[in-house]
Amino acid sequence: MALDGPANPDFAPAAGQAVERYRRNRRSDLAIWWREIDRPLLFLVLALMAIGAAAVAAASPASARRLSTAAEQLSDLHFLLLDIQWQILGLAVMFTASHLAKGTARRVGIIITAVSIALLLLVPVIGSEVNGARRWIRIGVSIQPAELLKAGFPIALAWILSWRARDPELPVIELSVVLMGLVAVLLMLQPDFGSTILFGGTWFVLILLCGISFRRIAAIGAAGAFAIAATYLLYDNARHRIDSFLGGGTAFDQVDLAQRTLLNGGLTGAGFWMGNRKFSLPEAHTDYIFSVIGEEFGLLACAGVVIIYLAIIVRGLIRLLDEEDLFTVLAGAGLVCQLGGQAFINILVNLQMFPSKGMTLPFVSYGGSSTIAQCLCIGLLLAITRRNPFLGREGFALPRAGDRP
């Protein structure tokens, strides 16, 4: 049989038309996505990631030399090269998630929460221990389930609390307490007191937005104080960090060193790769990267980073002002507050105003699980808050330039 050409002479033109239609539809989908997402928020996050790449480049020599062994000498740019790879992957995750419809984003968040809780159940059994904490699961690569949970927890919690809009009699607060309690127990088994505080703060913000009585607020405050006291008495790691912060010790020495490193650069910094105190920091590329920014780029650069975080929080909340869907308000507020809470806990630790928590600076610190999880958080936030600019608040189309009356 001769195979000189296609049996159907119209095959090639038809295939070309199909490809052209696909390209037009793809361009149209991208144009719609670009109109509907929160572009200022996206640009702020991208700016943070660019700052993070520069900060990791500055911190990489200190961490690489500290972690080098006789068997393996790490390049001064070792963590920068890895960070760039994680950032590229994170951007792919962010942009993919931001294309999801709101209902799909909600389902993804719920699934992520369920998977993360299942992995947290496995951490005490098969998890890897680092620095006295068992928080990672190794399955080819190291995964920290608590970081993955950050992308889903606010969405799952918002989904539960939003049931009240359909039936005010549903015990949504009680159900949220069960979810928060389960997460807290699993995190404290590692132990991870810092993440427990972060998730607890996110939960508290959302139930306040959902609307609860002052009596319940007082009861939650008393329960929180009891939980912190119990943690101090029962967990050596938490007690050691708090005692060190209050009265000196190894952890306090690390935080004190971080503060001294941060202030060493003055207002304008010592210059890129010109800092010397960073070589004494235990985790220059992760926990104490804010101090590296202060030493090499100056306090003005640190102030700029803080302003960007504040802008992200304000922009995220402003975006929710016109929303009437309870789930969107709660999920958006939860994701924004969780990101802001983690950022400012890390910054306060570097300023010697908070006990050391082992918590990264979002989008700035080096990290695989944390970078992917943070990018997924922003991607889901962009998806949930997508808005048709040609629809009014009541859903009616607004006139556009060039439309005929």
Image (spheres, rainbow, N blue to C red):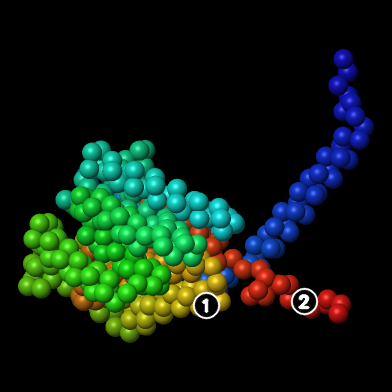
Name which residue lies at 88% across and 40% down: 13
The answer to whether residue 224 is visible is: yes
Look at the numbered disc 1 and give the secondary structure of its residue: loop
Q: Position of residue 76 (x, y in %)?
A: 33, 57
Quadrant position of residue 356: bottom left
Q: Is residue 18 left or right of residue 269?
A: right
Q: Which mark is residue 321?
A: 1
Name which residue lies at 25% across and 79% down: 263
> Spatial distance from mark 1 to mark 2, Cα to Cα?
23 Å
Quadrant position of residue 51: bottom left
Front tag of 1 and 2? 1
Between 231 and 216, the residue placed more toward the observer is 216
Q: Position of residue 62 (x, y in %)?
A: 27, 61
The answer to whether residue 296 is visible is: no
Q: Is residue 67 above or below residue 126?
A: below
Residue pointed to by mark 2: 400
Between 384 and 174, the residue placed more toward the observer is 174
Between 276 and 149, the residue placed more toward the observer is 149
Which residue type carries mark 2? Arg
Classify mark 2: residues with Cα within 10 Å, few (<14), some (14-19) or many (20+). Answer: few
Q: Which quadrant holds the N terminus? A: top right
